[in-house]
Amino acid sequence: MIRSFFAKEAGQGLVEYGLILVLIAIVVVGVLALVGGKVSQLFSSVNSGLR
């Protein structure tokens, strides 16, 4: 009974796609944390230039 429970692969693809999406989200958050300040300064300088 336990073997049959772990042998079932239904939903395995969905779990793999979920893990890939979580990994991508972590990378995006990390990149935004690293580059966010520079982008904010860039938009502030553009905003000041337009005024």
Image (cartoon, rainbow, N blue to C red):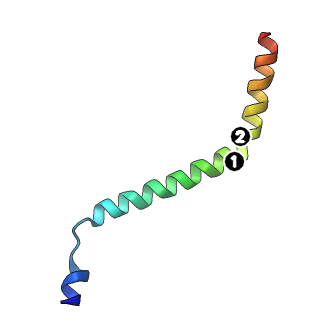
Q: Quick check: 14 left or right of 42?
A: left
Say few, some or many: other residues with alpha carbon within 10 Å of mark 1 (under 14 / 14 to 19 / 20 or more). Answer: few
Which mark is on residue 25?
A: none
Is 5 left or right of 27, judged from the image as shown? left
Between the C-alphas of marks 1 and 2, the distance is 5 Å
Work out which quarter of the rendered image holds the N terminus and state it: bottom left
Q: Secondary structure at mark 2?
A: helix
| Pointer 1 with pointer 2, Cβ within 8 A | yes
Amino acid under label 2? Gly
Vertical placement of 2 versus 11: above or below? below
In percent of width and height, residue 12 lies at 29, 67
Residue 33 drawn at (x, y percent): 69, 47
Q: Which residue is mark 2?
A: 36
- The residue at the point 44 percent across, 54 percent down is 21
| Relative vertical location of residue 8 with respect to residue 21 in this rendering, above or below | below
In percent of width and height, residue 31 lies at: 65, 47
Q: Amino acid at mark 1?
A: Ala
**Looking at the rendered structure, which numbered label has been put on residue 33?**
1
